[in-house]
Amino acid sequence: CLKQWYQRRVRGAKDEADRDSWIAALKRVLSDRHSKTGVKEAPPTQRLGLVAPVWIPDYGVSMCMRCEENFTAIRRRHHCRACGKVFCAMCSSFKQYLGFDNKIGRVCVSCNDILSDSIGSKPRTDSTSMFFSSEDMPHSTTKAQDTTISKGVVQSGDIEAFLVVKINDKEPQRYWCVLRGMVLILYAGNYDKRSKRELPILGYDVLTPQPEDKVDPVSTLKLYHRNMVPWYLTFTNDIEKDRWYEILTKAASL
């Protein structure tokens, strides 16, 4: 069907910009279809397991979307086949039948609870979940209860983008940068719930770097405060740089 065709394009996107454009196109198509036919989309919990989810890409998360433990070479990423979110092995250790794929697949704790209730059967388990119910899974805390059935939420604000950030003399790193009000927030992935760094920029100057800064002045902006270490933001094009300059300057002088 048309929706599955778009989903295949999303999964095969060459980069995040291409992926985001396909997702936006898919949403427009579904919205138009529902408005013209008057068909109301079933609640997410009723569609769970029957409709193939759009997977959140690996680069979009640096931590488990349930327990919020950071992924490492040992703690690997695993996609829930029901909701498409990314979890550690412990938080996605259940197995359930998925109607859209006509086979058993790995699911997360929240999806397992819903699918178990909907079919009235006990969940299939792997070697981890044999010893734990979904209520007492390791890492389970109040902050981690959730939200799996809702779509993954991209961190957003007044402006956001993947940028290369250099803080003082440290090595540059790529972050999902979000400006909310007067605070610049850095995330390792655009779906992460927990930030890596935050910088209140009130009182900062937004400048063009000088030769002594040892960065490309054409593609980079410098956030400078006389009592703080400087931050350098590197952009992919002039349009993006100009837009950030305008918004950062306004936020820093409020």
Image: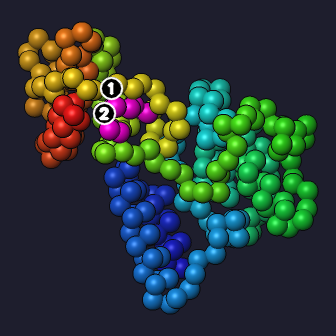
Measured from the top left, where is residue 229 in percent x and y?
A: 27, 12
Which residue position holds label 2?
182
Measured from the top left, where is residue 238 in percent x and y?
A: 13, 42
Please indicate whether residue 238 sits to the left or right of residue 125 in the image.
Answer: left
Q: Amino acid at mark 1?
A: Pro
Which colour assignment does the render follow? rainbow
* Total numbered badges shown on the rendered structure: 2
Crowding near the residue tagged with mark 1, few <14, some 14–19, many ≥20 C-alpha atoms within 10 Å:
some
Give SS at disc 1: strand
- Which label belongs to residue 22? none
Q: Is residue 201 part of the magenta span, yes or no?
A: no
Measured from the top left, where is residue 209 in percent x and y?
A: 12, 22
Please indicate whether residue 209 sits to the left or right of residue 199 in the image.
Answer: left
User: Can residue 211 be seen from the camera position used here?
Assistant: yes
User: Can residue 104 be seen from the camera position used here?
Assistant: no
Which residue position holds label 1?
200
- Viewer-proximal residue, 28 or 159? 159
Label 1 vs label 2: CA separation?
6 Å
